[in-house]
Image (spheres, helix red, strand yellow):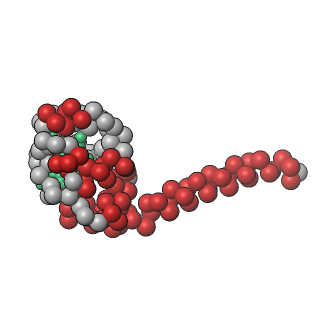
Amino acid sequence: MFTSLRLPLFGLLSLALAQAALAADCAPDQRHGAEVFANECGVCHSVTKGATGMMGPNLAGVVGRKSGSLEGFSYSQAMRNKNIDWQAENIAQLITQPQAYVPGTYMPYMGLASADDRQAVVCFLKEQH
Ligand code: HEC
């Protein structure tokens, strides 16, 4: 009886551990991330799916999206040529110093100095689908 339970239980346990590891990465940062986004990015970017009319492209679903690819947004040539998929790491690089990461970008942002703030805002963006 125990033998037959062991495998499914082990599976569940590994799943729980994997989720805990993910949560350890991001969960405590969610509220802080939302604040950082509101203070640093929200003036130019929306995370409401489909919302338009802001200076920057909508960032709902940006993690995993190809750079410069949002339909209807007029990107700089530099951003259109960047040709990467946005992931946590390269978004963090972009917001460290946009003009260094994408020379010629239209994103008029000086950069976010705190690595903790960068990590938190990227965690927040991962949850905006
Ligand atoms: C003053 C306005 C402004 C601020 C503040 C700003 N951005 Fe941007 N952002 C832009 C513009 C404009 C673009 C388009 C750049 C281009 O076409 O070169 C952009 C592009 C981006 C992109 C690329 C999206 C895509 O579809 O390829 C990401 C990711 C991004 N911004 C994240 C952020 C984050 C995170 C913050 C806050 C830490 C932030 N931005 C702050 C204006 C801004």
The picture places residue 106, in percent across and down from the top left corner, at 11, 44
Left or right side of 5 for 105: left
The picture places residue 14, in percent across and down from the top left corner, at 66, 52
The picture places residue 103, in percent across and down from the top left corner, at 16, 43
Q: How many marks?
A: 0
Asked where in the image residue 39 lies, by quadrant, the reply is bottom left
Asked where in the image residue 53 lies, by quadrant, the reply is top left
Left or right side of 7 for 69: left
Nearer to us in this view, 127 or 83: 83
Q: Is residue 124 visible?
A: no
Picture residue at 55% right of the left edge, 55% below the top: 19
Q: Is residue 2 visible?
A: yes
Outermost residue toward the right in this view: 1
Left or right side of 82 for 90: right
The picture places residue 58, in percent across and down from the top left corner, at 21, 45
Nearer to us in this view, 126 or 116: 116
Picture residue at 29% right of the left edge, 51% below the top: 93
Picture residue at 44% right of the left edge, 63% below the top: 27
Nearer to us in this view, 128 or 62: 62
